[in-house]
Structures are given as structure tokens and as C-alpha cells.
Amino acid sequence: MQFGFLLPNIIDRSDRDPFGGTRRLCQLAEEVGFDFVVIGQHRFTPCYFSTPLQVLTAIAAVTQRLRLCTGIVILPLHHPLEIAEQVAQLDEISGGRAVLGVGIGYRRYEFDALGVPYEDRVSRTEAALDLIPRAWTAQLDDESVPNLVPRPLQTPHPPIWIGARTGRAMERAARLGDGWMTGLSQPVSELAEVSAAYRSAPLVEGRGRDVCLMRQLGIGETQQQVEAEWLEPVLRFYTDYWDAGARADKDPAIISKVKAGDPVTLREFAEDRAIAGTPGECADQVRQYAADVAATHVCVVTQATDEAAAAASLELFGRNVIPAVR
């Protein structure tokens, strides 16, 4: 099993080196046992990365083995050949460590700002997922695609992981991708059934079938510490995402309680949903969740808003949970 983390946006634009903390965090993660870093994308949105491939290129320069994954690029907002070129360049620069994670997007304002019809996002995504691997692997005399320069180092090409939650999206991931990236909060008991369907779909020749389980991480020396320091920010995160329109994998009962001002306990929130508690408890949850969905990869997401907090969570998980599970 491979372990990764979603890179928090800890850019300090008041510093002469705004990305210093980002680089140090990735170096620490590599040191304590993480295998890959994931960077998401939202356009025209504060506190999110708008150009994740550029950030991953900077990370490639200060790491040696950490795989570099977009999680996710909003694919219909880009020309597919532009993405193909950029990922191939990242793969070349990093020595073959690129992973392209994509999704269709759900925030209409991002599409409106770029003049891309929101209703076309599925068809644009599927067309791009057909074109990108062909551009990476086409013979030089293939006139159906331009000659891509550079070509990626990985063979046959960098893995393509597809974010999916619903039946049609899962079918797309099985048919056009090499892996599936789960949602953050969809209960693991529900994911187990979805994962079984994904893994039983016909395997396309030359393609992979990875399962990347995305889970929120709250880790501390005691449950009381996690409940005091982590629970409120993560509940706020869930509510914000609900309000932004990402409702396919959200629990309406939890959201209703938060909005009503009713208390939600750590156990109530985390059960079947998050990795939360002491290192030993987190290791048990990872084992159970990974077994339930047959995960090949686990990606943890902290609610840290500064370098010190993010580093503390990643180090505690990396030095205690990763070796225990492995």
C-alpha cells in the first residue's frame, strides 16, 4: 500500500519565499515515509491552488522519490493537449514521478469565468481522457495527434486517476483511467460496494486499476487533543463544501446538526468516515478502511492552516501509522 497526503495551502505571501513552507513540508513527508503528494485545483478561489502542475514542478526539484499527483485537475477547463504537454514535462523533470488525477468539476462560476459551458463538462472530460494518452504514446507518423514534446518518461504513460462518486462517473474511471480517487467523506461502507463494482468492470488492456482512498486525518497523542483541535475546523470544512455544491458524498445529518449548532462528537463524525484519533486508532482505521475498499493507495487530508500544524500531523502519521500498517 502507498501513502500520500493532500498538500495544504500554506503559502505565506508576506514572506520573500512564499513557498518555503510548502517545500519543507514535502521534504519532511518524504523523510517520514509518504510515497506521494496530491494537489487539488480550484480556479478563481482564495486558499486553493489554481495551477497545481506548476507547484508540483517546484516540489519535484526538492524531492527524490515522492510521486507528484494532481488531485484533481478540473479537466474540462483546459485544452487536453495543454495538460498532456505539462504532465509530460513534469514527468521528465521529476524522473518519472507524475500522476494525473482529474475530475469534471462542480463549481459553475469557474466555468462561467472561462466561457466554458458547464453542461459540456462530461463530454469535454471524456474527449480529453481519450486524447491525452494517445498524445503521450502516439507513433511519430500518427497524423491524428500532434507530435508531443517532450514525451513522458513512464511507460506506457503516467497513470491517470479519475475522481468519481456516482455510477456513471465510476464507469468512466474504469473505462478511461488507471485509477479511481474516492471522495473525502462518503462513508466507507458505501465505498465498499462502489469499489467492488469498479474493480469488477472489464479491464482495458494496458490500463491500471488503482484505488486511492481519500480520507480526512485528525491525529494526536490523545482523543481529547484531536477533538479539541481538529473537529471544529473539519466540520467547518464539510459545511463550506456542502454550501459550495459538493453534496454527492456529504452526510446531510451531520451538516444539519452543524448548521443547527448542535454538538457533534469526534466518534460520531469519524466513524466510517475519517481517520481520527491516536496513532494506534488511526492505524486500525486505515487497515479496516483499506481492506473494505481494496485500496492500493491511501491519501490523508489534514485541516492544518500553517506549516507547524501540518508538519506535526504528517510526522506523527508517517513515523507511527505508516510503518504499523505496512
Image (cartoon, grey):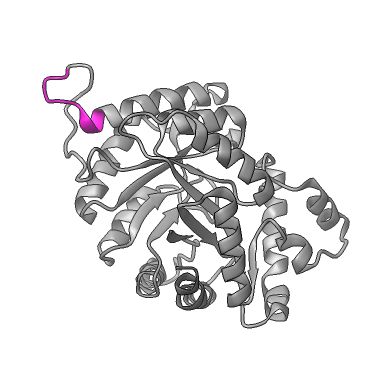
94 or 281, which is in the foreground?
Answer: 281
Note whether residue 113 is visible. no
The span picked out in magenta is 135-142
Across and down, in percent, residue 116 comes to: 49, 26
The extreme left residue here reads: 141
Q: Nearer the viewer, residue 111 or 88?
A: 88
Q: Quadrant of residue 161?
A: top left
Q: Quadrant of the C terminus?
A: bottom left
The extreme bottom residue here reads: 221
The quarter of the picture where residue 100 lies is top left
Q: Position of residue 69 (x, y in %)?
A: 39, 51
Q: Nearer the viewer, residue 93 or 320?
A: 320
For the question of whether residue 5 can be seen, the reply is yes
Residue 233 belongs to the span the image colors magenta: no
Quadrant for the N terminus, please. Answer: bottom left
Left or right, 114 with reference to 137 = right
Q: Is residue 141 left or right of residue 133?
A: left
What's the residue at 33%, 57% (across, down)?
Answer: 67
Drawn side of residue 36 relative to residue 260, left or right = left
Vertical arrangement, residue 176 with respect to residue 302, above or below? above
Q: Position of residue 104 (x, y in %)?
A: 51, 33
Q: x, y percentage for residue 271?
A: 72, 60
Residue drawn where x is 48% and y is 75% of the image: 311
Residue drawn 67% across the image and 62% down it? 234
Question: Could you tell whether 196 is left or right of 30 in the image?
Answer: right
Callout count: 0
Q: Quadrant of residue 202?
A: top left
Give the vertical position of 129 relative to 150 (above or below).
Answer: above
Q: Is residue 139 magenta?
A: yes
